[in-house]
């Protein structure tokens, strides 16, 4: 039953991964570079899964000459994830000749494995495949596997660093970040982390005498990959914009760095900001960005960003949304319309996301909008 389930799941997953790769290769929407890197990632998963399945069913024991072709591919995973992350974060990301340096470990390992393996006799090749199938390998093998996991982990760490910096930047430039905060990318990265943890456990369980436990866990990565591929399909159908990428350029990093401002100029900008916020209520624009506010204020984005960060000790996102929450508090406190819903208040105040509205409201007031409304009704 277990083997049948593995066969069924793996066949479905491989088909889905190949379909996703084909869709991304042929899609005319979004960023081509991002789509193609992601397509290669899905192809990588399909090839890796196929290789593991063939090994599990003993094909390489019967035909050892076809084995170890895919093993060096593990060194492609890290660079693929890192390049995809940068392609989503930066609009001007392009693959350059210099990026080929990231492929050196893959090329060296693949070449070395093929040269070593195919110089052995057919009998010894079969012996190697039996040792792999029986999880009875020399210590050096496990050391090399640990290096593979370390290599991938470094790239995942660097990718998360890129996302962290990106998220900090968008909160300095946009008042609504729900659609551009790269939740999709974080989901994908965390899924890869789970797959790696399970794979790591399965690789090293036989070493510590838990070979039977390894057999019982064999189905786990297939179940998770099934969940992952279906989640990707669902997210892609529900939110096709997740494949579109973000409009930041790599050189923009210096664009919003601070510049010297006199106390007089800083005070003038604060007064202009107060006017736009309190009289014009510009924060009610749900799509308000730093550049748009700077245009209305008649100053540069750089100076505006510096004043908001230095004078108010807030990023642009928090600065605008505090005004929105205060507006929501005012409406909930003063409204006499019994039919007015919290959702209507949310839209009136410039929010598009219910979860973001509730989170920020509770962060500032200590209560949910509904609790706040009830507390004002009691008074």
Image: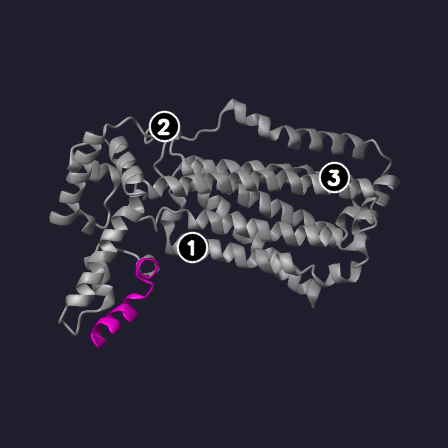
Q: Outermost residue, front direction?
A: 263
Q: Which mark is residue 254?
A: 2
Left or right side of 176 for 334: left
Asked if the residue at tag 3 contacts the one at tag 1, i.e. Cβ–Cβ closer than 8 Å, the answer is: no
Residue 328 to residue 256: above or below: below
Marks 2 and 1, how far apart at CA: 34 Å
- Secondary structure, mark 3, is helix
Q: Is residue 35 visible?
A: no
Q: Main secondary structure of the magenta part?
A: helix
Q: Mark 2 or 1, which is nearer the eye?
A: 2
Work out whether 313 lies above or below 7.
above
**Start-end of magenta stretch:** 361-379
* Residue on which disc 3 sits: 144
CA separation in Å, label 2 and label 3: 41 Å
Seen at 16% across and 39% down, the residue is: 271
Figure quadrant of the N terminus = bottom right
* Front position in the image: 73 or 272: 272
* Relative horizontal placement of residue 141, taking residue 368 as reference (left or right): right
Residue at the spot of label 1? 235
Task: Write the residue at 24% across / 36% down.
Answer: 291
Q: Quick one: 261 or 36, which is closer to the camera?
A: 261
Name, please, the residue furthest toward the left.
Answer: 279
Verify whether residue 13 appears in magenta.
Answer: no
Q: Secondary structure at mark 2?
A: helix
Image coords of residue 96 (percent x, y): 49, 25
- For residue 368: magenta? yes
- Image position, residue 320 (x, y; %): 25, 48
Whether residue 82 is visible here, answered yes or no, is: yes
Q: Residues within 10 Å of mark 2 (few under 14, many from 20)?
A: few
């Amino acid at each position: 039953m277990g083997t049948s389930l593995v066969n069924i799941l793996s066949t479905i997953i491989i088909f889905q991964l190949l379909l996703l790769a084909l869709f991304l290769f042929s899609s005319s929407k979004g960023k081509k570079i991002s789509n193609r890197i992601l397509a290669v990632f899905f192809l990588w998963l399909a090839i890796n899964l196929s290789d593991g399945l063939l090994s599990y069913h003993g094909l390489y024991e019967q035909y050892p000459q076809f084995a170890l072709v895919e093993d060096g591919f593990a060194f492609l995973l890290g660079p693929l994830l890192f390049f995809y992350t940068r392609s989503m974060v930066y609009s001007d990301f392009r693959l350059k000749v210099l990026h080929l340096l990231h492929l050196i470990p893959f090329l060296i390992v693949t070449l070395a494995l093929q040269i070593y393996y195919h110089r052995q006799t057919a009998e010894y090749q079969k012996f190697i495949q039996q040792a792999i199938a029986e999880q009875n390998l020399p210590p050096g093998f496990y050391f090399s596997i640990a290096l593979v996991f370390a290599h991938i982990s470094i790239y995942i760490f660097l990718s998360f660093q890129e996302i962290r910096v990106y998220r900090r930047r968008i909160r300095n430039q946009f008042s609504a970040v729900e659609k551009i905060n790269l939740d999709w990318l974080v989901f994908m990265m965390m899924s890869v982390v789970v797959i790696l943890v399970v794979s790591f456990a399965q690789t090293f369980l036989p070493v510590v005498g838990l070979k039977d436990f390894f057999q019982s866990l064999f189905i786990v990565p297939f179940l998770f990959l099934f969940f992952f591929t279906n989640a990707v399909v669902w997210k892609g159908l529900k939110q096709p914009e997740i494949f579109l990428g973000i409009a930041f350029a790599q050189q923009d990093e210096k664009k919003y760095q601070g510049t010297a401002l006199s106390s007089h100029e800083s005070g003038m900008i604060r007064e202009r900001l107060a006017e736009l916020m309190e009289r014009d209520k510009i924060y009610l624009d749900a799509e308000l960005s730093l550049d748009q506010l700077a245009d209305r204020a008649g100053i540069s984005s750089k100076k505006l960003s510096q004043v908001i960060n230095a004078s108010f000790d807030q990023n642009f996102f928090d600065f605008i949304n505090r005004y929105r929450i205060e507006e929501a508090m005012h409406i909930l406190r003063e409204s006499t319309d019994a039919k007015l819903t919290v959702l209507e208040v949310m839209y009136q105040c410039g929010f598009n996301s219910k979860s973001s509205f509730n989170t920020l409201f509770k962060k500032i007031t200590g209560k949910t909008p509904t609790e706040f409304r009830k507390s004002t009704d009691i008074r």
